[in-house]
Amino acid sequence: MLSVLTNAWALLFGIFLLQIGNGLQGTLLGVRGGLEGFSATTMGYVMSGYFVGFLGGARITPWLLHRVGHVRVFAALASLISAAFILYAALVDPLAWFIMRLMVGFCFSGVYVVAESWLNDTATNETRGQTLSAYLMAQMIGIVLAQALLNVSDPGGYDLFIIM
C-alpha cells in the first residue's frame, strides 16, 4: 500500500480535495436554495443537472484523453469545477445553478474517467486492488469531511462557496 501511495499521492490528494468540494456542493446548494426561497421542485431540477452532465462527461472524456492526455484533461476539468463552485455564490439563480451543475457533473464524470484510467495505467496486476482502494478511500474521506465544513460559516454568505 505504501508503494501505491508513493506513486499516486498527487492524484489521490487532488481527488480528495475535489471530493471535499463536491460533497460540500451537494449539501450547501440545497441549504442555500432554501434560504433563497427556491421551491423543492426547483431545487430538484437544479440538482438533477449534475447527473445530466455526468452522462455527457463519460462519453466525451475518453476522446479528450486520446487527444491531449491525462494531465491536461484533469487540470482543465478540475479548473472548470473550481470556477463553477465560486460562481454559485455570484449567480444565485436556479437556471444558472442548473447550468453550472450540468458543467460540474460533466467535469466530475471526466475527472473520474481520467483518474481511474490513470491509476489503471500505473498499477500492476498485483497492486491494482490496493490502488483502487486508496482512490475510493480518498473519495469517501473527502465527501465525509465536506459535511463537517457546512458548520464552518454561514450558508447564506460566500465563504463556503470559496472553501468549496
Image (cartoon, grey):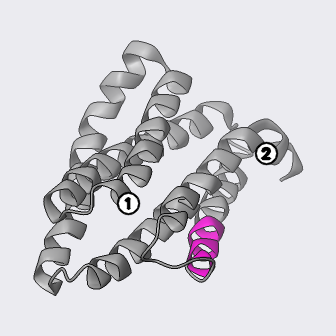
Magenta-tinted stretch? 140-149
Q: Main secondary structure of the magenta part?
A: helix
Q: Nearer the viewer, residue 108 or 38?
A: 38
Residue 43 lies in the magenta stretch = no
Residue corresponding to mark 1: 89
Q: How many marks?
A: 2
As drawn, which residue projects farthest toward the right?
2
Image quarter of residue 46: bottom left
Query: Is 71 rendered above or below residue 20?
Result: above
Numbered disc 2: secondary structure: helix
As drawn, which residue projects farthest toward the top?
67
Question: Does residue 51 show up?
Answer: yes
Q: Residues within 10 Å of mark 1 (few under 14, many from 20)?
A: many
Q: Nearer the viewer, residue 81 or 151?
A: 151
The picture places residue 134, in percent across and down from the top left corner, at 70, 57
Residue 145 lies in the magenta stretch = yes
Residue corresponding to mark 2: 4
Q: Nearer the viewer, residue 92 or 2?
A: 92
The picture places residue 117, in percent across and down from the top left corner, at 51, 36
Q: Which tag, 2 or 1, sits closer to the chain's start?
A: 2
Q: Residue at x 36, y 50 (%)?
A: 87
Q: Residues within 10 Å of mark 2 (few under 14, many from 20)?
A: many
Q: Residue at x 45, y 29 (%)?
A: 76
The picture places residue 156, in percent across and down from the top left corner, at 42, 76
The type of residue carrying mark 1 is Ala
The type of residue carrying mark 2 is Val
In the visual, does 152 lie left or right of 49? right
Image quarter of residue 125: top right
